[in-house]
Amino acid sequence: MNYNPVSISVCMIVRNEEKNIRKSLNTIKDFVDEIIIVDTGSTDRTVEIANEFGAKVFHFVWNDDFASARNFALKQAACDWVLNLDADHTFICDKENSLKKPLENIKMLGLMINERTYDSDKSFQDSDRLLLFKNHCGFKYSGAIYEHPLKSIKEYAQKNKIAQPFGRIDNCRLDHHEKSNIKQTTKHKAVLKKAVKKDPDNYNYRFNFLLAQKDGGDNDSYKDELLKTVYRIEQNNPLLNESIVAIWGLFGDWVIEDNNSDSVEKFYKNAGTLTEKTKWNDIRLVWPYVKVSIMQGDFEKAISDLEKCILNGVAPDNVYLKDEEYIAPIYQLFKLINNQKPAEDFITCINNISELTGKTKTDSLQVFKFIRKHDPSLFEEIFNILNDDQKNLLSTENESEEYNSSAKIDNSNQNLISLCMIVKNEQKNLERCLKSVKGIVDEIIVVDTGSTDESVEIARKFGAKIIFTAWHNDFSEARNLALEQASSKWILHLDADEELHKESTPSLKNLLNKSHADAINVVVRNHQPAEDMVSFLDETQVRIFLNKKQYRYRNKVHEQIIPSIAENAGKFEESGIIINHFGYQTNNEQRAQRNLNLLENELQESPKDAYLLFKMGETYKAMKQWDKAAEYLTKAISNPQGNITNEIKEVIYLRLGQISLAKDDHKSAQEYASACLRFNAQNAMAKYILAITMMYSGKMEKGIKLFMELKATQNIHGLDLSEIDRLLEIFENVNVPDKILN
């Protein structure tokens, strides 16, 4: 009986691949019978090198269509099977002829090969790709980019009743080293743009076009194309597929970053429907959906949705995710449960990790190693819950960082605190600020946005690292530039017109060495102008936080760090640390006018952003435009999609109470003061307003009682009660019950 051995053609489309093609052909030449090279316009030595391997070289005029080039190569192939490779593939096989042996007498039409894709950091992701299939005239590639022959082979199998058209080769592998190449991205973007124009309802093209724009850094074009694509989906209501789900995920990431309340609401509504339809099985959509739940304070829903996604495998099998992208959702779930649930729930979750990882492409060991690397504090808590076998396995892992049985973490080589500041012409204030942290912080990062005075020289005297940058009317941009340079574990944010309170200096380092939080709330003590009746007003702000790359400021003016920490399930901790702020004592109106223009520009983009509305109200108050201030403060507190904390609501009601009292609207002032006290029953100024309005409304006894409470705590809140003292002297001489005055 005559034996006809299986033959294989390898097909490549190439252009200017002289750096890769020799290595690739060397790894495959002994396993195939024919090499087909389709060159789309090389100007280097690519063709010359291919000829050295006896390749059949064909020239093809590039038409922005990868499938067209692949199909041209298929027409040139003469062997039984076709293997399609790229020039940056290397073929790994355990023994000679093992590629052909599985193909003998096989009824399957195509075989999956494991492709191992390496990133620049040498991590890799394995995936199965249909690159080897029978050379049949009906098998064609489709797709202008990210092309594949799956559709045509499936159609042939159905027509010829082939129940199992696909198999897998287990003893071979392709290594693919991913290129971060601007030219490559630009080329793909041009191809995809043309493909989208030709087939506008192909959402796979649209999704990949969006990715190419995003990777290319063209933020404005990316935003426009993203909004256009989402609008098209809403209008046409196409049949749901994975590309559409992924596009909604991109939209979610964008609306969170943009912080537009209307867009967030639209995303959240649609994502809620889609997550149910897809059974929470695509982290690309679920994670931004969960982040919005966290932003809205709905931690129960965030935990539930994230857990469903993990239990359903994180993502569909054919969606490419890196190993860390399977692990990160489990890590975030642990953080959420640890921060928001009782300790027993956290222990149960850790003990059930095998159930969590069951359908994902990871395991408990990889999860724990990831957390050990990225969040040592959380890992220490987890380590103490693990059983002895798990501890021993982790302790014996040959990693750069070693843990003993008690999981003690050595941070001795890392600085503790980096002070990060932005300054411009602050010679009057800067020295006071830097003196207050001398011996406390380990490094000082100063971003100077154009000082023409002695600010830079003062900063250098304290050993600061100076970064010079142009001012782009964006406080977050400048603050984030400072964060990029910081090397310590913790970031301390101060402005030049602030200082660390002398009573807080002894306790700060001790607090941070013991803390397991991601962010620390401090008391910012705003010292008021001399003519004010109150010497200072306290407010709570996050001014200390862990130095993590995902924690970055947002908003061009009145920048915030809280949203980026909250959406990453960061843990917040209260403290008694006090920062003195002297900026309101002078130049209040000048500062307000500077901020007004920046805020107006931001509000044009996000007209319903409650935080921006609040800051507009504060700005107009500083400019003594009371009606304008009340208008914006009322809008902020009335916004149902507001992104403001209870502390800010307390301030809004207080401001509205102050404005109403100044306008002799005692009824409104009393209502606002009462609302303020619901958020903070110890707010001295609100008590003062309430006392005044009660006296004006005839409730003298209640008003005097409140004044007596204020007088008893005058040394704490700093209220000037000299006028009240004179008033009380008058009342002592009239018939007022002793129980009120005593």
Image (tube, helix red, strand yellow):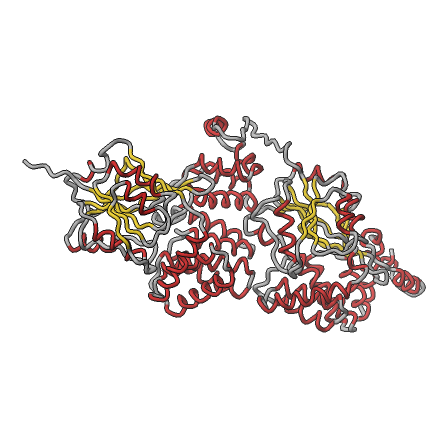
Q: Residue at left 69%, top 55%?
A: 449
Residue at far left of view: 1
Q: Quadrant of residue 644?
A: bottom right
How far across and down, in percent of the image, does residue 626 sit?
74, 71
Q: Please give left or right for residue 449 compared with residue 84 in the image.
A: right
Q: Please give left or right for residue 264 compared with residue 456 in the image.
A: left
How far across and down, in percent of the image, does residue 465 sit?
69, 45
**Is residue 654 shown above or below 146?**
below
How far across and down, in percent of the image, does residue 545 sit?
64, 46
Closer to the camera in the image, 57 or 261? 57
Q: How many marks?
A: 0
Closer to the camera in the image, 70 or 427? 70
Residue at far right of view: 733
How far across and down, in percent of the image, does residue 681 sit?
72, 56
Residue 2 seen from this side: yes
Q: Quadrant of the C terminus?
A: bottom right
Q: Please give left or right for residue 10 compared with residue 193 in the image.
A: left
**Is residue 267 shown above or below 123?**
below
Q: Please give left or right for residue 449 compared with residue 352 in the image.
A: right
Residue 132 seen from this side: no
Q: Quadrant of residue 608?
A: bottom right
Closer to the camera in the image, 140 or 356? 140
Q: Quadrant of the N terminus?
A: top left
Q: Residue at left 28%, top 32%?
A: 94
Q: Residue at left 17%, top 45%?
A: 80
Q: Quadrant of residue 650?
A: bottom right
**Is residue 112 shown above or below 208?**
above
